[in-house]
Image: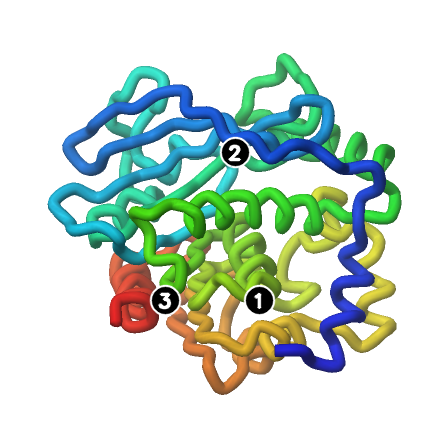
Amino acid sequence: MSTPWQQKWLAAIGQPTNYEFAKNLTLQEKFSTADFDGELYLQANAPGGRQQKLLLMLPKGVSFPCPAVVVPFYYPDVEAGYDLQTKEKLDEKRSRALHLVRRGYVVATAESYHLTYIDSERPRQDFERWRLAAEALLHDHPQWTGIGKLIADTKLIIDVLAADPRCQADNIGICGHSLGGKIAFYTGCLDQRIKAILASDFGIGWDQTNWRDIWYWGSKVEQLIAAGMDHSQLLEIGDKPFMLLAGQYDNEDSRKYLHAKSRIFNHATGHQPTPEALEAGFKFLDECLKK
């Protein structure tokens, strides 16, 4: 659905230059856990041979094709609830992808660009990698934005689900928390293949969280504010079901940005969603995707 705001937002997000690359997807490993069958891929996501590690999680005991969900975050292990190198079980409290595959969804999750855009010997948990990768990205593509790169890489994940015969291409949702919530919100609103958006405590207002960090919008936030742009317009562009799990950065003030197809669950207990909030969010996805 085209809206008066769509071109303004796309122009602000920007476009890279000289960014052509072959969209290769290479299977690296198949494995099985007690919770899901996994397929680990390397997916081209930038020129110069840059690739993101992508995990496809297949539910057990279901008939394919079935609905699918993209779960963006820093790297796949956290969302999967497993160390992908050792296959050891991790603390699953923050593993939204694991909960979703248990509910019968095909789930895809991948590395974010702070791990893929530049070579670095820093540990992947080192937050400085975000600043260094974003600076390199904007040096190479000054007409682009960090949020644009996050959207572009997530669209590549959607490509995989949309082309996989085990997925229902018309029943793909997106779910994310914090940074993943920002990615889920933007990609879900701007990619018509996404049917429903679940985002947790990402700070929907400009001053509610760190939108001014260089790996998102940087100094462009002030230009957006001056132009009267806020995230209610992205919801208008997407015009699809959206659920916000509020807790710390999102709160009752976040309601003013929501639209008629939006819901909010404000657990008000801090940044991490409660089990009750997550269950409400997953039921929302079930309502939208399992018809």
Seen in the image, is 25 located left or right of residue 216?
left
Crowding at label 2, few (<14), some or many (≥20) Cα neighbours within 10 Å? many
Query: What residue is shown with label 1?
Result: 189
Q: Is residue 110 above or below residue 166?
A: above
Q: CA distance from mark 2 to mark 3?
A: 28 Å
Crowding at label 3, few (<14), some or many (≥20) Cα neighbours within 10 Å? some
**Where residue 23 sits in the image (x, y, percent)?**
60, 35
Query: Secondary structure under badge 2?
Result: loop
Query: What residue is shown with label 2?
Result: 111
Residue 28 occupies quadrant: top left
By what rule are the colours in the image chosen?
Answer: rainbow
Dot 2 amino acid type: Glu
Asked whether residue 247 appears in the rendered view, the answer is no
Query: Secondary structure under badge 3?
Result: loop
Q: Residue furthest bottom?
A: 260
Residue depicted at 65% across the width and 32% down the height: 22
Please name whichever residue, 129 or 117, is drawn nearer the observer in this view of the structure: 117
Q: Is residue 218 above or below residue 188?
A: above
Residue depicted at 72% across the width and 72% down the height: 6
Please name whichever residue, 24 or 251, is drawn nearer the observer in this view of the structure: 24
Q: CA distance from mark 2 to mark 1?
A: 21 Å
Q: Are marks 2 and 3 in contact (CB under 8 Å)?
A: no
Q: Is residue 126 above or below residue 269?
A: above
**Where residue 114 sits in the image (x, y, percent)?**
63, 32
Dot 1 amino acid type: Cys
Choose the circle earlier in sequence order: 2 or 3.
Answer: 2
Asked whether residue 115 appears in the rendered view, the answer is yes
Instruction: Choose mark 2 or mark 3, whichever is in front.
Output: 2
Query: Secondary structure under badge 1?
Result: helix
Instruction: Choose mark 3 or mark 1, whichever is in front.
Output: 1
Dot 3 amino acid type: His
